[in-house]
Image (tube, rainbow, N blue to C red):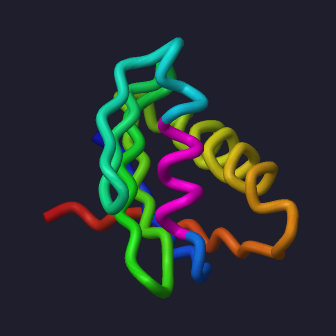
Amino acid sequence: MPSSHADVATEHASRYLQQLCKHWAHKFPVEFDPSHGTIDLSLGRTVMDADAAALHIVVSTDEAGLLERLESVVADHIKRFAFREELTFDWKLATAA
């Protein structure tokens, strides 16, 4: 399953994780607490972990061609919640084990 990850530096990682999960909870299967969340979007799965310094995001999809779109959708939504700060999403493809 193609996947990529990004570590987004922010002191508000837990807030953004929870906002994104709540935002999509009416439309997609979502599970979350203040430090971990999963969202099963129609494009693929998003898994997030928050700590004091960063939001760690992994996105995965069944179709390699959808990975870039999924990255964009997730990043764009988080950027909207984080309008008070400039976040950087440096997506890296996961290497096969």
Q: Nearer the viewer, residue 41 or 53?
A: 53
Residue 29 percent location from the top left of the image: 35, 20
Residue at 13%, 65% (x, y): give it. 97
Residue 88 percent location from the top left of the image: 71, 75
| View extreme (left): residue | 97
Question: Taken as a whole, is the magenta stretch helix, strand or loop?
Answer: helix
Residue 61 percent location from the top left of the image: 39, 34
| View extreme (top): residue | 27
Q: Which residues are magenta?
A: 13-21
Q: Is residue 15 above or below residue 46?
A: below
Residue at 49%, 69% (x, y): give it. 55
Q: Nearer the viewer, residue 68 or 33?
A: 33
Residue 12 percent location from the top left of the image: 59, 72
Quarter of the image where one finds residue 86: bottom right
Residue at 71%, 44% (x, y): give it. 77
Quarter of the image where one finds residue 60: top left
Q: Is residue 87 above or below residue 28?
A: below
Q: Is residue 7 above or below residue 76?
A: below
Magenta span includes 45: no
Q: How many marks?
A: 0
Q: Is residue 88 left or right of residue 65?
A: right
Residue at 76%, 61% (x, y): give it. 82
Q: Is residue 56 above or below residue 75?
A: below
Quadrant of the rendering where the N terminus is positioned: top left
